[in-house]
Image: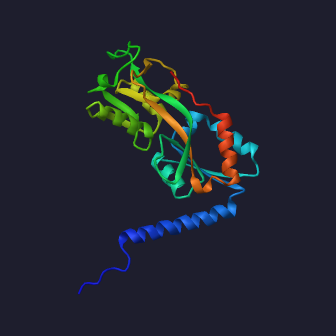
Amino acid sequence: MEKRPFVTKQQLEEIIRQYEEIRHGIYQLTVKDNTLRLACARGVLNALSFELLMDFIRGHSGIEVEWVEESNQDVKEKVASMQAEVGIVVGHTRLPEVQEMKLASRAIRLIVYRGHPLYGRSEVGIDELRGERIIILNEQFEIFHTFVGVCRAKGFEPDIAAKTVDSSFLYQLCKGRVGIGVVIDFSTEHFRMDGVRVIPLRERITWDIYQIWNKKSARYPNVREFQQYLTNRCKVAEDY
């Protein structure tokens, strides 16, 4: 007669989850007054300004900030599992353990090279990118998933000619006429637009940045201090 396991796979996963929550909870109780673990989605500190974080660190010497940069989804999961007190992410976090506050909104733009049929346009619709060779940051960045999702909603799969982790290299590929670049507006601020143009999309597609925190850590003084700091320093802006 086959014996049934004393614990199912689902029960075991729940036990492990509870153990991790307790372990991280003990850690937080130990260091809650002088340590802040901050996880940031790739690219968000560039959008908000890295000085924003540095100013907080310089102005709060009593709080030791431990920060990492990871994929958008990994940051959300870190905060949900209490491996980080605060996260800065792109898009809503639909997890029951997590609360959020919008910090900023940035626009998705195109980089189009001189000589391309779309080069002289004042704006371009998503439908017009059907069949165009696209250059974009890779799957580690939320812009990739946002753009691909919008294209699929329009009924087509974008032709991704190149994926990269470097906005400067993306710009060079556009300049070399490899394809049309898809970027966040702030990423072009330091580029010399020689032979290329930044063109808005007709559709209102934004890259929305949120601060997130676990509901259980909301009462900790260092978390409240950082929340208040970001509230005072960040202003929700629609860049159009």
Indicate the quadrant where residue 44 lies. top right
The reply to whether residue 159 is in sight is: no
* Left or right placement of residue 147 versus residue 94 in this view: left
Could you say where residue 172 lies in the image, as x and y percent from the top left? 43, 28
The reply to whether residue 15 is in sight is: yes
Q: Is residue 210 above or below residue 115?
A: below
> Which residue is outermost to the left?
1
**Which residue is nearer to you in this view: 138 or 128?**
128
Rendered-image quadrant of the N terminus = bottom left
Q: Which residue is drawn at 30% across and 81% down?
A: 4
Q: How many marks?
A: 0
Indicate the quadrant where residue 175 lies. top left
Indicate the quadrant where residue 131 lies. top left
Q: In this view, does 196 lie above or below 235?
A: above
* Left or right placement of residue 207 versus residue 45 in this view: left
Q: Which residue is drawn at 61% across and 34% down?
A: 49
**Which residue is nearer to you in this view: 46 or 11?**
11
Q: Which colour scheme is used?
A: rainbow
